[in-house]
Amino acid sequence: MRSIFDYKLEDLEEYFESIGEKKFKARQIFEWIYKKHIYDFYEMSNISKSLSEKLNNEFSTDLLTIKTKQTSKLTNKYLFELDDGNLIEAVLMKHDYGMSICVSSQVGCNMGCTFCESGRLKKVRDLTAGDMVKQIIMIQEDINERIDSVVVMGIGEPFDNYKNVMDFVRIINSPYGIEIGARHITISTSGIIPMIEKYGDEDLQTNLAISLHAPNNELRSKLMGVNRAYPLEDLIDAIKKYIDKTNRRVTIEYLLLKDVNDDEKCANELADLLKGMNVYVNLIPYNETSHTEYKTSPKEHVMKFYDILKKRKINVTIRKKFGDEIDAACGQLRANEVNKL
Ligand code: SAH
Ligand code: SF4
């Protein structure tokens, strides 16, 4: 049975037309689900009994099961079980300016970055749009507060699951849906160039983040297998084209790994690479895991790296270490759980 949460408004409109019903029923269903949080077709008072019955037979409204939840002052981390028993994670980050959720896009990841727990466990399957929508609904219901922004930075490579991720974005962005502003939605990719081009052609005002993590091919290929298929110079070209086309600033994520990519030479090389581009760099402290040798950069390295970029007129911020109090960057909770099996 298809999940109702997989449907974009226009898909649901098409469905209603195909069964000889009025198109506007789709908007009503969207409003019941996403605005009024009613998930039982029989409780939708402007839907006839016979139509409720039909919908009930054709669509599942099941949500997810919370397997574990860890809370701290700044974050809640959720491990969810999907209807087929697979596990995924989502993280709620409590900023001063509002609530932000990091969602997963796949069960595992095939990109195999050497520092990442999500990549250590190969992809089991893509998430459907509904699987992603449900992560937001579950958290929204759990905290009973509005979600302001969404980042697709959890487990998985969103551009290896492009269509479903785009459907997800359109569902949560819809004025009849959860209505999260496009400018408050960010997709992070390890650098799948053809999809960056495609993303630039979408009629959406959503944001792009690129996991760069190294300023040259030699180092980047060691950290990220994807660099062998899409080398750095081509990636930078694709980012420039994207910026030209969309006029939007791109976030460059740079994970700082002690004595691997955090010295002055790397900082200067990175500044050379990004010179004149409309980007801002987010320096990410590494969350150590027991499965890799990588270590978190010490504060002195981080500050030196930051100062060099600043001096070279690159916009740069150091990401608050959100996950650390509960000892988990996205992917680690699931990895621990799967290891136990
Ligand atoms: N696959 C996409 C999105 C998910 S990963 C991508 O790679 O961009 C989201 C971010 O978390 C990436 O920048 C990734 O490099 C980073 N990351 C992975 N493992 C991490 C860890 N242990 N500590 C901190 N960040 C990590
Ligand atoms: Fe996949 Fe992103 Fe992890 Fe790389 S960093 S393995 S692309 S989830």
Image (spheres, grey):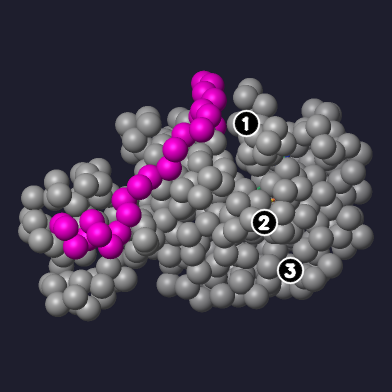
Nearest-to-viewer mark from 3 and 1: 1
The residue under label 2 is 123
Q: Which residue is drawn at the image coordinates 73% and 67% (left, top)? A: 236
Q: Which residue is drawn at the image coordinates 65% and 41% (left, top)? A: 331
In space, the residues marked 1 and 2 are separated at their CA atoms by 23 Å
Q: Residues within 10 Å of mark 3 (few under 14, many from 20)?
A: many
Label 3 secondary element: helix
Locate the C terminus and report the quarter of the image it occupies. top right
The residue under label 1 is 323
Task: Measuring from the top left, give residue 261's x and y in whole percent.
Answer: 86, 46
Task: Measuring from the top left, give residue 147's x and y in whole percent.
Answer: 38, 41
Residue 310 appears in the picture as rendered: no
In space, the residues marked 3 and 1 are separated at their CA atoms by 28 Å
Let me know if residue 6 is in the magenta part: no
Residue 144 located left or right of residue 205: left
Label 2 secondary element: loop
Q: Amino acid at mark 2?
A: Lys
In space, the residues marked 2 and 3 are separated at their CA atoms by 23 Å
Residue 287 located left or right of residue 334: right
Q: Amino acid at mark 1?
A: Gly
Let me know if residue 56 is in the magenta part: yes
Residue 19 appears in the picture as rendered: yes
Which of the two discs, 1 and 2, labels the residue nearer the N terminus? 2
Locate the N terminus and report the quarter of the image it occupies. bottom left
Q: Which residues are magenta?
A: 52-77
Q: Which residue is drawn at the image coordinates 43% and 72% (left, top)? A: 203
- Above or below for 338 versus 194: above
The residue under label 3 is 235
Residue 170 or 5: which is nearer the viewer? 5
Q: Amino acid at mark 3?
A: Leu
